[in-house]
Image: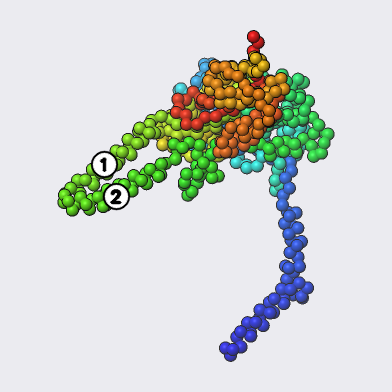
Amino acid sequence: MVSRAPWAFAVLLGALLWTGLPGVPGGTAAFATSPPKAVEVREAEPQASGYREVVETVENLPTKGDLKATVRVVTLVPNRGFTPIQVTVHNNGGQPRPVRLSIHSQGRIMERSLEVGPRERTVTWLLMPADLQSGTLNLDSPGMDTASRGFYLDGYRGARVMVLGDVKSFEAATGLSRAPENNEPLVATRFVEPRTAPRELAAYAGYDAVLVAVPADQVPDDVWAVLETFAVTGGRLVLDQPPANPRLRFPLLQDEKAELSPYGFGFVRQFRDCRKQTPGCGFRLWEDTERSPAVVEPAGPPPRWERHDLLSDGRLPLLSSARAPVGRFLLLIFLFVLAVGPGGWMLARRKGPLAVLIAVPTLAVLTSLGLVAWSVLVDGFSLHAARYSLTLLDRERSRAVTVGLNAWYANLAEESVRMPASSVLLAPTAPEDPPRFLDWTNGLVVKNSFLPSRSYREWGEVAVVPSRARLTARKADGGVRVQNALGAPLKGGMLKLDGQFWDLPELADGAEGLATPREAKVGDEDLLGLDHEPRMRFQDAVTPLVRELEDGTFVARLGGRGFSPTAVLDVELEAALHVVRGQVEEARR
């Protein structure tokens, strides 16, 4: 009976396989129909089409008295930077009222203070870091209790577009319709009234694109100024109905009739030819969002379960002082072990156990004091920094357009930094111990604390700042003499003048020197002089600086602190390189 068991099992297995073959009565058709199922799966995959409208709702704050306030919630969170939250405050009384608006989220506070005049309605904006998904809005004013309202944001992870206009104007401009519920949209949209749109660059910088879907005369002048700053600092700006003379709003446009124009570090698209083409302007908008990486990507810390010297994505710190001196510490520990082990044994044989009881604690105290002395004398209490930036000088408008990358190591905490409204401070994608207090009353003031003690941090910056920096050149003795008026030491570079390329000499700020002619064309790497690590963090932002030089144009490499707003901080520079491109100023004798 036992010997028949294997045969019975074999017969049963054969019957099961037979009934599973295709074409056998009673058998399964799984094998025969597997290719059609694969086709069905592919057909079931949603095809991206249309757009997704993030519908914002208006919530009233439970205020008492003359002040009334509302907040628009379920707002679309941008890719990076800050999420603008719209708050409307209405003072029904006959006296001006000071108001403090604040958002509390995960132990962090974002606030703005303002004064609302009698019977005045004010629309203002509070900006939340994009890594936050919810919060509580508080309204405080003298003589009334705090009014609070909780809210959530929309964390959609596809392409995100801010639209200045309404749904009707957007659909007319792009030809897109709302995507069916189960289909993947090309873009998600957030609609903003143009006349009350934000006036800070930080409100726009995180979105993949900004579309102006209304006529140019419906956008206030100060909003146009912010949109131009958004485009020149690396944003994708799309115009459905361009102004009659686009150069009045966008003075750096080379071809005012072009569909897509590079503009500083960013791009400006005007809906012109796409209206007559297939698939249309909505598809072009989606293409712009796909080509919208951040102009600078500071590296954040790795996950807590992968702690080592590398940062996120395997990047290396830009500061050598941020790395622990492992070799020296191991040597010190080895010497301590030798002194306590064999040294203590020898001391015990010669002087007795009492000497060991005294010597070992004394040696431990001396070693600890040595470590403290090393930290004080070598690292000190200063703020260590490595600063890199890419800058386009706009000499006609006396401004510098800057994309900056800063690495910091603070032995003592650095509590605050101030940023103007024409700049944005960009944190890594997953920040660690971010600042706890942001005041948006006049620009941005970062408090508590900007840089924690004994911590390595990287911050990105984009900014447009006033600047009179320039490089002057004049023909002399068959060559070219240049004067460095760029506000920092000149480390080299290249100039094109009268069809000839010239190498710029190393010059101190304010000094003059003779440029030398160059025969061979310089490569991008040699022209920029950036090492691999900072170059990888700038991504495509280097493209405007390595474009072919036009006559009268220069690219210079500078030392010093650069042009970005954080240059005012007192730091000990360990590394610095700032690549500047602009028009040379020809001096006449």
C-alpha gap between disc 2 and disc 1: 16 Å
Residue 403: name its quadrant: top right
- Residue 567 appears in the rendering: yes
Q: Secondary structure at mark 2?
A: helix
> Tag 2: residue type?
Leu
Residue under the point 59% across and 36% down? 535
Residue under the point 70% across and 29% down? 548
| Residue in front for this viewpoint, 548 or 431 | 548
Disc 1 target residue: 365
Q: Which numbered tag is attached to residue 553?
A: none
Residue 267 vs residue 273: left or right?
A: left
Residue 238 vs residue 96: left or right?
A: right
Q: Nearer the viewer, mark 2 or mark 1?
A: 2
Residue under the point 64% across and 9% down? 589
| Residue in front for this viewpoint, 555 or 182 | 555
Q: Which numbered tag is attached to residue 338?
A: 2
> Tag 1: residue type?
Val
Residue under the point 66% across and 24% down? 517
Q: Secondary structure at mark 1?
A: helix
Residue 450 vs residue 513: left or right?
A: left
**Quadrant, the N terminus:** bottom right
Looking at marks 2 and 1 on the same chain, the residue that comes earlier in the sequence is marked by 2
Give the farthest residue toward the top. 589
- Measured from the top left, where is residue 408 in percent x and y? 47, 33
- Measured from the top left, where is residue 438 in percent x and y? 49, 29
- Measured from the top left, where is residue 453 in percent x and y? 41, 35
